[in-house]
């Protein structure tokens, strides 16, 4: 906003499960890949409903099913296979915790949001090389990046090697990688 010279825009960092704003304060709420990372999505959705003015609009996105997002799922699967535990562990919020469109719609409607619609959006991912994909995807998955940093080098290398094998089906002739990807985009309004 600053770079564009916009003076009617402000930003704040807020807790989605306890938005420090008055009720009916916003005409619109946008949330990109955040709701899926909350420990209580129902509470976060209720907060979105609370801060929206009557008939205010919301739009949010979360990642679709893990198997339809191999660009990230294969990395998490590789870490889980080497470590012998699912990544992320069951019950811990993660990138695919709201990947079922019916569950996402139910969470939002249960929070009092109306006219909830959940659609799929194709979001393919590409990388010029395995290294580029590895660096970007590990960095994107913050908790995974921290976990990898804490592991012995041989364990980290084993995860990396397993991931490199797992992504081979997505290799392109020029040494890059092309992955399919799916996001769920939900929209609606305050009741």
Image (cartoon, rainbow, N blue to C red):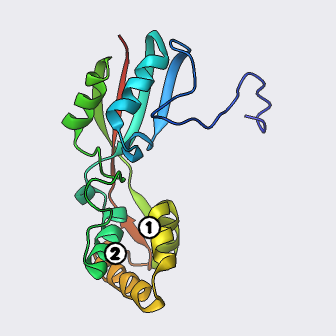
Q: Which structural element holds mark 1?
A: helix
**On screen, 104 above or below 80?**
above
Question: Which numbered circle lies on residue 144?
Answer: 1
Which label was assigned to residue 55?
A: none
Q: Using the rendered view, name the quadrant where residue 178 is placed.
A: bottom left
**Residue at 44%, 25% in the rendered image:** 48
Q: Pointer 2: what residue?
A: 79
Q: Are marks 2 and 1 in contact (CB under 8 Å)?
A: yes
Mark with earlier residue (2, 1) = 2
Residue 98 vs residue 86, the one in the foreground: 86
Q: Quadrant of the C terminus?
A: top left
Other residues around mark 1 within 10 Å, as few (<14) / some (14–19) / many (≥20): some
Instruction: Identify which residue is drawn at 52% across, 65% down.
Output: 139
**Where does residue 85 sit, x and y in percent of width and height?**
26, 72
Work out whether 115 lies above or below 138: above
Q: Is residue 120 left or right of residue 11?
A: left
Q: Residues within 10 Å of mark 2 (few under 14, many from 20)?
A: many
Question: What kind of element bears circle 2?
Answer: helix
Task: For residue 127, say whether it is visible.
Answer: no
Residue visible at 46% across and 87% down?
152
The image shows residue 178, relative to residue 110, as above or below, that is below
Q: CA distance from mark 2 to mark 1?
A: 9 Å
Choose between 66 and 97: the one closer to the eye: 97
Image spot of residue 148 (x, y percent): 46, 76
Residue 113, picture quadrant: top left
Residue 110, percent from left and from top: 26, 23
């Amino acid at each position: 906003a600053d770079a564009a010279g916009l003076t009617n825009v402000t930003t704040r960092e807020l807790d989605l499960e306890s938005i420090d704003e008055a009720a009916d304060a916003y005409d619109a709420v946008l949330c990109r890949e955040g709701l899926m990372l909350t420990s209580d999505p129902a509470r976060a959705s209720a907060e979105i409903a609370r801060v929206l003015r009557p008939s205010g609009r919301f739009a949010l996105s979360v990642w679709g099913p893990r198997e339809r997002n191999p660009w990230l799922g294969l990395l998490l699967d590789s870490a889980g296979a080497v470590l012998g535990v699912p990544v992320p562990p069951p019950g811990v919020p993660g990138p695919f915790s709201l990947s079922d469109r019916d569950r996402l719609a139910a969470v939002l409607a249960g929070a009092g949001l109306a006219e909830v619609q959940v659609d799929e959006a194709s979001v393919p991912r590409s990388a010029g090389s395995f290294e580029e994909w590895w660096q970007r995807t590990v960095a994107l998955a913050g908790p995974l990046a921290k976990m990898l940093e804490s592991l012995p080098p041989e364990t980290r290398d084993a995860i990396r090697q397993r991931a490199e094998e797992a992504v081979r089906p997505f290799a392109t002739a020029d040494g890059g990688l092309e992955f399919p990807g799916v996001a769920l985009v939900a929209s609606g309004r305050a009741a």
